[in-house]
Image (cartoon, grey):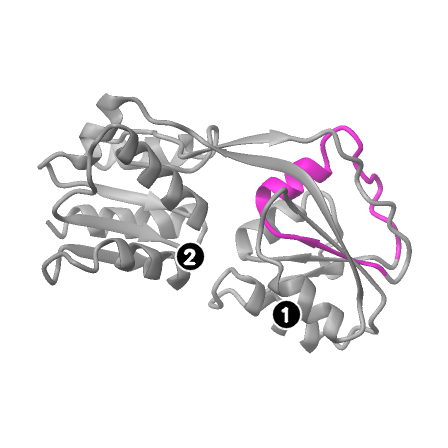
Amino acid sequence: MLTRPEGRNTSLASALRAAGLTVIEAPALAIRRLDAAVPRLVAGDLCIFVSRQAVDACFDGEAVTPWPDGVRAAAVGAATARALRDHVPPDLILAPDQDAPPDSESLLAAIEAAHLTPGRAHILRAQRGRDWLAQQLQARGWHVTCHALYQRSPVIWDRATCEVLAGPDACTLLLTSPEAVEAVDDSLRRQGLDWPIALRVVTLHERIARRLQCLYADRPAGALAVRLSAPDEAALFQAILASARSA
């Protein structure tokens, strides 16, 4: 079951089906561009993109084209950095190392390693999100403004979709955000169903894994098997394939 937003699962689903897996595309979150202006950027600014959705929202409609001279763009993870390369010169992009977790902590390390002079920082994000990076940058002398460019809303699954997950058949679930975990949990509860007795999950970050472990805290040992993966399609394909074949 692939739970990334609509339009993000197509190529991965095709590859998994070609490998012999049964695939259900069941987005857990819906993404909607908000009627909000992209910030005006000037030399010395740092523009932080927290996700691929932030990149899409920035360069849709009121796009900053061409990218302003002297403005650094920062990406939370490798997938976001790849999306940025279609719009921003590569030498102006900051991102965590390929092997680092795609999170604010890793991005802060990359920003500090670049030895930038604190100035204005713009964080492009959803309506809701972690404030940790903004707080850390402010403590280091940056003037930080958060810009909500898109909205993430939970998708309420129908009963048939919930029953696939809650049923007895072996299932590998792709979950790429804490909000997706909460959306799936809400859908199951609405249908009067519980998480399956045994579940295999592929995810991107230990924070998501810890939330799932809380949900399975009263289950027998081994009921939950979590694999961490890099966010690129090839890594996700290999992780899901390995999880599915580990049954």
Q: Where is residue 121 in the image (x, y as percent from the top left)?
A: 78, 60
Q: Is residue 21 visible?
A: no
Disc 1 or disc 2, which is closer to the eye? 1
Instruction: Give the magenta part as a residue range.
Output: 45-69
Q: Residue 108 carries which label?
A: 1
Left or right, 14 with respect to 138, comes to left
Give the residue type that dot 1 points to: Leu
Answer above or below: position of 128 versus 151. below
User: Which of the marked residues, 1 or 2, is nearer the chain's N terminus?
Assistant: 1
Q: Where is residue 32 in the image (x, y as percent from the top left)?
A: 60, 29
Towards the viewer: 238 or 137: 137
Left or right, 210 with respect to 143, comes to left
Q: Please, what secondary structure does the residue beneath circle 1 have?
A: helix
- Residue marked by disc 2: 230
Image point (87%, 45%), residue name: 40
Towards the viewer: 71 or 178: 178
Q: Is 48 part of what is drawn in magenta?
A: yes
Give the residue type that dot 2 points to: Ala
Answer above or below: position of 54 versus 159. below
